[in-house]
Amino acid sequence: MSLLASLEVLLNNRIILGMVAKRRKEDVHSSLLCDFNNGSIVHNHELFSVDHKSLKILLYYDDLEITNQQTKRKHKLAMFYFQLGNLYSEYGSKLKSINLLALVETRHLKKYGIDAILKPFIGELQVLGDDFGYDFKLQNGIVRLRGALFAVIADTPASQLMGGYKESVGGAKRKCRHCMADFDEIQSKFREEDFQLRDKDIHDYHLKQLDENPELHKHFSKEYGVTKRSVLLDAPHFDVTDQLPQDVMHVILEGALSRTLFFVITYFVNNNFFTLEDLNEFVLNYNYGYSELKDKPVFVCADDLKSPHENLGQTAAQIWLLSRVFVFFC
């Protein structure tokens, strides 16, 4: 689907156009990090920092699998969506604010490459990001706006693929797409200032090494964690070292937070501070808010404490809620 045509339809909604035209006071010079508009990328961005009406495009990518009920044949699809980041934060999680951009069978994506899929999208971003912007035909006349890709949101393998990094981070010495940490540093350092962050200059150097030394491609790819030049670099004002955020659901909720809860609960249970029955009774009877009921944690059983990799039998949303209410139990 055409990005520009879809944006034109959205902007013909007067409410959406109003949100693009006028930022709320809390989005301007706020000391609170309410959403990405308060973050450093927006404030330092060469377009967003000078033109608050510029369109902020969020690109999503994920895979799904569907099954034909008659033939039982499975079809794996790559789904691409976009969202207009100018919408106020309360609309960010609404399904109706997320728009389909493209869908393709995964086998075709693997055959032709993700660059071929994204090329038309990048071409429209180049038009939108041009100095003269793009003329949108709205009900009351022509409105000229500029815009750019603000972030690409996906799980770790998909983000690595789109950014031109090693899709399987286990095969790279430098596993992170934001810094140059190796395995040993990851085990012993835990603050951003302790690491050398990737930036455009470093990334350009890595790409130059890959391009000028094809016979050493495998070596440099493993050393730097970079496999190729991403087509996203053709999008105006986009930096693959800074605008591919980490996957909070898998990395934090089903990763660090889940493991932390596992070890804390295991320690307390093994040292007789409380029993699983006590914990489950608390989980059952806690006074959850209306919006929390759908994510109410399930009971934690003894088998859930055998491995830290099972997420205590919870979904990501349940882990998040359990971690918040657990402090009231202790």
Image (cartoon, helix red, strand yellow):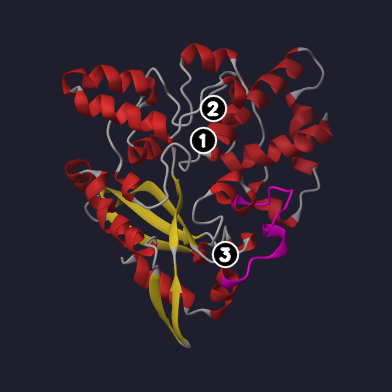
- Which residue type does callout 3 highlight? Leu
The amino acid at mark 1 is His
Of label 3 and label 2, which has the lower sequence position?
3
Residue 310, labelled with which disc? 2
Q: Residue 11: image x %, image y %?
A: 48, 75
Q: Is residue 17 visible?
A: yes
Q: Against 74, is 121 above or below?
A: below
What number is the disc on residue 46?
A: none
Q: Residue furthest bottom?
A: 140
**Spatial separation of the CA atoms under disc 3 and disc 2:** 36 Å
In percent of width and height, residue 150 lies at: 47, 52
| Residue at image location 58% in from the left, 13% down from the top | 188
> Residue drawn at (51%, 62%), measured in percent from left and top?
95
**Residue corresponding to mark 3:** 87
Query: Tag 3's secondary structure?
Result: loop
39 is higher (above) or lower (below) than 186? below
Element type at mark 1:
helix
User: How much space separates mark 1 and mark 2, taking CA atoms?
Assistant: 12 Å
Q: Kindly identify the residue that appears in the image at 31 percent across and 49 percent down.
A: 234
Q: Which residues are magenta?
A: 21-36
201 part of magenta stretch: no
Residue contact between numbered discs 3 and 1, judged by CB atoms under 8 Å = no
Q: Which mark is residue 250?
A: 1
* Mark 3 and mark 2 residues within 8 Å of each other at the beta carbon: no
Q: Is residue 236 left or right of residue 67?
A: right
